[in-house]
Image (spheres, rainbow, N blue to C red):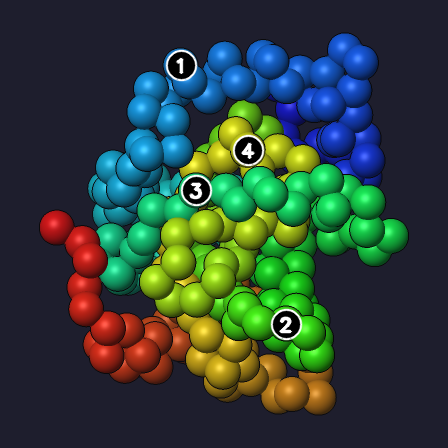
Amino acid sequence: MPGMNSFATHEKAWDYLYGPNGKGPEATTWFHDKFPDGHATSIRPLAEHLLRETKADRPLIVEEGKCTFHEGALELMLAYGIDYAPYVDKIQMMHEMPRKPEIGSCFANSWLFMEAINSAEKSDKRLVYVEGVAVGYLASTMLHAWNSFGLQDTRAIDWSMYPACPWNRYFGVPFTETEHEELRTSIFPKKKRRAISLFDVQYFPLLANRIIDILASREPVGP
């Protein structure tokens, strides 16, 4: 089966899954075979596996931006990470929106989506940015970013992969908009407006101390 990034547009991915001969039923069968407890299935063991592979010098290369998890980021994710289930209530609305996310740009999509929603006058939910591991019917195990409704919420709003999100599992660490801006602009000043991955091998070493400080104020959730 193809990966999400194999599709030129989100409309083509949507048709692949929901069209007259769509693969939605096949995706549902795949998902229940892969995750017998459905979205109650934790993928923390997958993150543990990624850490073992990274320590054995067999790092996972992912499609999304060709990023590789940093070992220290995986350790923090296992201490503070949360399992997320996809928030599917707004998928049809996302599909009908005239503006679509960029294919293969989840870090930018999640950052900009958070900013847009949080700045809306009628917004009564403050979105956070979440980064971690995702896997699904159209997503090989990857370093990925999505959004949620606050630091304690467990609903994944996946603007980047909205057509396929009902068949995705997510495990990651949330950051508020203020925290994310501080981390991002410590690498690139505000005037450059560049998206980054917080957990990849390129940027995590530059951000690690501040990320550790941010997370130290929270209660660890790992075993």
Alpha-carbon span between mark 1 and mark 2 = 38 Å
Disc 2 marks a residue whose amino acid type is Ser
Among the two numbered marks 4 and 3 on one chain, the one whose residue lies closer to the N terminus = 3
Front one among 10 and 125: 125
Badge 3 vs badge 1, beta-carbon distance below 8 Å: no
Which mark is drawn over residue 33?
Answer: 1
Q: Nearer the viewer, mark 1 or mark 2?
A: 2
Q: Which residue is mark 3?
A: 85
Give the residue at the far right of this rendering. Answer: 98
Q: Residue 20 placed where, x, y %?
A: 80, 13
In the picture shown, does residue 162 fall above or below 79?
above
Q: Residue at x 40, y 47 (%)?
A: 84
Alpha-carbon span between mark 4 and mark 2 = 24 Å
Among the two numbered marks 4 and 2 on one chain, the one whose residue lies closer to the N terminus = 2
In the picture shown, does residue 43 fall above or below 147?
above
- The residue tagged with tag 1: helix, strand or loop? helix
Q: Nearer the viewer, mark 2 or mark 3?
A: 2
Q: Which residue is mark 2?
A: 123
Judge the density around disc 3: few (<14), some (14-19), many (≥20) Cα neighbours within 10 Å.
Answer: many
Alpha-carbon span between mark 3 and mark 1 = 17 Å
Q: Residue 114 placed where, x, y %?
A: 61, 68
Badge 4 vs badge 3, beta-carbon distance below 8 Å: no
Say left or right for 69 vs 160: left
Judge the density around disc 2: few (<14), some (14-19), many (≥20) Cα neighbours within 10 Å.
Answer: few
Instruction: Residue 120: name its quadrant.
Output: bottom right
Q: Which residue is mark 4?
A: 166
Q: Residue at x 58, y 41 (%)?
A: 88
Judge the density around disc 4: few (<14), some (14-19), many (≥20) Cα neighbours within 10 Å.
Answer: many
